[in-house]
Image (spheres, rainbow, N blue to C red):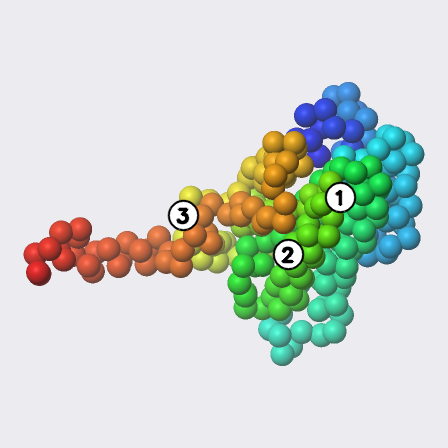
Amino acid sequence: MTRRLAGEGARIAATDLDAAGLDRLAETLRTSGTEILTRAFDTREAKPTDAFVAEAVARFGRLDGAVPCAGIAHAAPAELMDDETFTRVLDVNLTGVFYTCRAVGRVLLAQGRGAIVTIASITSKGGQPGRANYAASKWGLVGLTKTLAIEWGHRGVRVNAVAPNGVDTPMIRDGIPEEFLAEVMLDRTPLGRLARPEEVAAAIAFLLSDEAAYVNGSVLEVDGGLTAGYLTHRQGADFARKRGGPNDQDKRQ
């Protein structure tokens, strides 16, 4: 995402818990001529979030947009999920995002323009076994996004979300059993593959841009068609075969 925005000429303020990863990102972008500010801290804490936003404004003079994208997932059956597992996911995925939106929103509202894009999930479209914490955080995030869009839209600040399916990253490949990936996720996705990071980045870049000037409070699904229906490839093919072909109904009439 940062590479996509940098490629469009943006100056970048980026944060992460991974200081070494931020250093590598900064080195890469600076080599290509991008001005970038980085700080490693936990976005679950409001004070460092406020301080970093203030530092970015002091450095760049203004903010045009933000993408609060911190997110984690820890799976467990709801009846076995402990308090820490539930609250940590909510704190990172929802509370921390609120802190960022609040800090950035104050700046954008003072400027009278700007855009924020949050990162929802297809899980914000329905439940998912073993992910009560994650689903609650993403449903809450969509509610937050739409509420901010209503509160801030008439003051020049747009707030939208993207809702990806699985994105082809090491976290997905390492964290999801191969048989589940092939037999469930990919079979249910009409395009038959995971999203590429650059495809999600393109959707984010669009929502941040002036080309999306009349898009506000929307959740853009970047899911390969997964949420378009309810039958998998195999189920759909089986259904079509059992129906006997397109002219079978006419023959029976």
Residue at image mark 2: 142
Up the image or down, 56 lies above or below 147; here it is above
Distance Cα–Cα, label 2 vs label 1: 20 Å
Q: Nearer the viewer, residue 214 or 83?
A: 214
In this rendering, would 187 be left or right of 152?
left
Q: Farthest residue to the bottom: give it.
A: 79
Q: On the picture, is 240 further left or further right than 218?
A: left
Instruction: Tell me which numbered mark, 1 or 3, is placed earlier along the sequence.
Output: 1
Question: Would you say residue 62 is visible in this rendering?
Answer: yes
Pointer 3 residue: 190
| Camera-side mark, 2 or 3 | 2
N-term mark: 2 or 3: 2
Measured along the vertical axis of the image, is residue 43 above or below residue 13? below
Report x, y in % for residue 161: 63, 48
- The residue depicted at 61 percent of the width and 39 percent of the height is 214
| Place of residue 49 in the rendered image (x, y in percent of width and height, measured from the top left) | 86, 49
Q: Which residue is mark 1?
A: 155
Q: Residue 96: x and y, percent?
A: 78, 55
Q: What kind of residue is marked 3?
A: Pro
Disc number lying in front (1 or 3): 1
Residue at x 62%, y 61% (from the top left corner): 139
Q: What secondary structure is marked by label 2?
A: helix
Counting residues from the start of the chain, the first of labels 2 and 1 encountered is 2
Q: Amino acid at mark 2?
A: Val
Circle 3 crowding by C-alpha within 10 Å: few under 14, some 14–19, many from 20:
some
Please name whichever residue, 99 or 226, is drawn nearer the observer in this view of the structure: 99
Q: Secondary structure at mark 3?
A: loop
